[in-house]
Image (cartoon, rainbow, N blue to C red):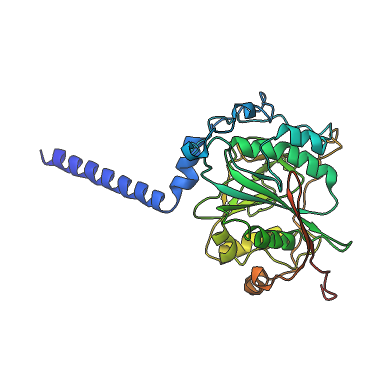
Amino acid sequence: MFVSRMENHCFLLFVFVFQAIFILILYRGGSSNVFRGFLESPQVADYSKPHDVYTNLSLFTRAPNEDTMSYCSVQSPVLVGPLTITFRVLPSERMIMEKNPFVRSGGHYRPPHCFARYKSAILVAYRNQEKYLRHLLYYIHPFLQRQQLSYTIYLIQQVGTGSFNRAKLLNVGVREAMKDEEWDCLVLHDIDLVPENDYNLYICDEYYPKHMASAMDKFQYTLPYKSFFGGVSALTPEHYMKMNGFPNTYWGDGGENDDIATRIHLAGMKIVRTSPNLGRYRVIDYNEATEIQEPWRRPPSRHNTRKTWKADGMNTLQFRLLSRTKHPLYTKITVDIGYVPPSS
């Protein structure tokens, strides 16, 4: 009898401890990182059976009366999973416009049949990459529409012939985009990456910065190294300001990704990642016959992020706004961000 009671007490203690751990996981953000992902996305995606990127868009029709519209479902009912991606034919701007009739001037979209639950700004650093831009626009607009997001695509263009500064351009994009809307999520997107699965949701994690491009084809669908934060990432405005944005001092070398990952941790946050099964991206490459690439080398860093992150970022951002133009498929922000300092 005594042994039976002891076993019963041990079982109750086990149940109590399990419940406490479960509640702690939920509190720490596990619901957004693990359980929401389990509920919203297929656990195994069959990439041998992809779908056309414009599948199901014809199901969207404008509501007759906005006053009677309801909120969009938490999970979009028209997601299809793996997508057919090819870069053999360069789409024209007119073709992209015709296939996306609900996209408004400036590259803004909101669902015509329901109120979006999420508002995401898509920010793309850019300079003279017209072919890449058209491929990205062809795929990204229907991809985002099937997710039932309210979104705007921002192109931040650097003028001049000096070294490209992706991170500083994205800082400019954040500052300018926040003038338009109180965005829920800032998606920082390389122009040469196209997502392969529309269950890779372009919304932010509530608690931490999210790295979305966790499996690129040029890296054989693996991370090049553990702390990699390049390609596509999603941060709330609060995340972005807490880490003082991105660094302004990386010109041309691509080493800003390590700096960004470091400042995330220095700001008391951690990186969460979209699962490699969903966070798959194709790199826009016109030489499709070349499947095997040379091993990618991590660029050396000449910066001490621990010393500089609080004094190099959004709080020291300087630029000259030259123009802000609404195009049919995107908003272009043209800026002069200066040149590499002589001492760099």
Q: Quadrant of residue 309?
A: bottom right
Residue at image coords 86%, 32%? 289
**Quarter holding the N terminus?**
top left
Looking at the image, which is closer to me, 66 or 318? 66
Q: Position of residue 167 (x, y in %)?
A: 72, 60
Q: Is residue 53 left or right of residue 45?
A: right
Residue 176 seen in render = yes
Q: Position of residue 46 (x, y in %)?
A: 62, 26
Furthest residue in direction right, as rendered: 161
Residue 195 seen in render = no
**Quarter holding the C terminus?**
bottom right
Residue 80 higher or lower than 210, as above or below: above
The mark tally for this picture is: 0
Q: Quadrant of residue 86?
A: top right
Residue at image coords 58%, 33%? 62
Q: Is residue 282 left or right of residue 113?
A: right
Looking at the image, which is closer to me, 69 or 205? 69
Q: Position of residue 76 (x, y in %)?
A: 53, 34
Residue 226 higher or lower than 329, as above or below: below
Q: Position of residue 132 (x, y in %)?
A: 81, 43
Furthest residue in direction left, as rendered: 1
Residue at image coords 40%, 49%? 26
Furthest residue in direction top, as rendered: 49
Looking at the image, which is closer to me, 331 or 127? 331
Residue 336 higher or lower than 292, as above or below: below
